Image: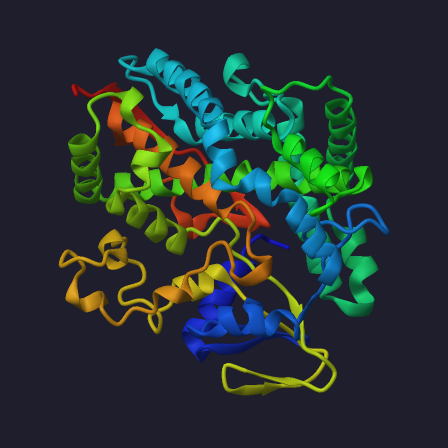
Amino acid sequence: MRGRESHAVRDLHHKYGPVVRVNPEMVSFTGPTAWKEIYGYPGVKKFKKFGYRQLRPGVPDLLTANGADHARQRAALNRAFSDKALREQEHHFQEHIDLFLARLDEKCGQGQPLNVAQWIEFLAFDIIGTLAFSSSFNCLEDRGYHPWVLLLLNFFKSTHYVLAAKMCGIFSPLVLALGPIRDLRKGEEHLRRSYAKVQERIKMAEDDRRNDFWTYISRQNEQKEGSMSVEEMEVNAALLIPAGSDTIATAVTGCLYLLLKHPKTLERLRKELDAEFRSQTDITMSRLAGLPYIRAVVDEALRMYPPISGELRRAVPLEGAVVCGHFIPGNTIISVYALAAGDNASNFAQPKRFTPERWLTTDERPDWTRNDHLEASQPFSLGPRNCIGMGLAYAETKLILARLVFRYHLELLDDEFNIENQKVYLMWQKPPLSVRLSRRET
């Protein structure tokens, strides 16, 4: 309830090893094979999701659906997150980033501290509004949070309290009663707005130039290859908006913070970018896809600061099961905490050291990282229920980061953003990332 669960579980693994009973009902794993055994194709049929609440009773969504419902909804959304869809929508990303950089240009030379984390959040929410509904939140335009965005931040907290309460057995009602009622109510308002936004979008006139998420879903519904009812569209919208915004903001801000803490690594990244690009207009998703170092920077930042740092709960069947060499009794809840698996010396040498080179396949990879278990870092999970937006997340994170560090010198003014001191309520409660900006000569 204090927002320190992910850190506490990580510390328990440091003390007791790769298998830890973190409460009477749940066992956490950090071994390098844990992700595959629990969430991969062998485990997905054996271990069912546990503890997630349906946003609307009786209506499955991507997070809560099992079996056929999940496969059907995933098929309906696959095209919206395909490489083809990314190419068709890249101009939306670029236009929003253009405005983002224009807003930062206004701050250059003023000598005043700038909370760049806030501006990155503005950008991420504006992009997801356009991608999902062809309607930006206009945070960058208005230079402030849209009221709905503020509701979203409370939605994360309310969802965290509900998940935590479900682990308290007969005391669940008491835990919920002691939780922040204000946040729970604001979470409900987010759901109402999501439902209304879907209704608004499906009433829009046909437009061949529009390629938002619901365009692709509608095509799938027509082709019967995967379908989604209007009610399912509404509940999935309530998930996709936060999943496609705050997680991106966390990834970009985490990358930037770690780069600013490690100037030599930042210069190594700039060297790669400067060798490839001559101007901002040259920086595209397709050209970034061929650059290994920026991908390594993102992978290393996601290992150290995974946007979803906590557990993904699964239930062991009645007959029990063997996980990572240990027999686990039936009805036990099992999980991998991304932060605990990534910040673990059994998986990664010097895990607190920001070393993108550990992800390279060239001679630039240090010898002391050669025994790292890179598969132990799975910020998007894996298997048939991994994050459907993984490709989009990598492409968007790299595009924002590349255009930001290519354009500006950034000076970190304090360490308020220190990851170790942050709280997590489903998502990270990001403090200000204070920088001073100046334009680079390129």
| Residue farthest along the front direction in this orientation | 223
Q: Quadrant of residue 221?
A: top right
Evaluate whether residue 205 shows in this view: yes
How many numbered circles does the render carry? 0
Evaluate whether residue 417 shows in this view: no
- Pinpoint residue 123: horizontal percent, then vertical percent: 48, 26
Against 374, residue 319 (above or below) is: below
At x 65% / y 26%, what residue is drawn? 133
- Pinpoint residue 181: horizontal percent, then vertical percent: 77, 42
Q: Quadrant of residue 224?
A: top right
Residue 223 lies left or right of residue 364; in this view the side is right
Front-most of residues 420 and 99: 99
- Pinpoint residue 15: horizontal percent, then vertical percent: 43, 76
Residue 278 lies left or right of residue 404; in this view the side is left
In the rendered image, which quarter contains the C terminus?
top left
At x 73% / y 34%, what residue is drawn? 190
At x 78% / y 69%, what residue is drawn? 169
- Pinpoint residue 434: horizontal percent, then vertical percent: 36, 30
Against 437, residue 49 (above or below) is: below
At x 22% / y 40%, what residue is drawn? 269
| Residue farthest along the left direction in this orientation | 363
In the rendered image, which quarter contains the N terminus?
bottom right
Against 259, residue 95 (above or below) is: above
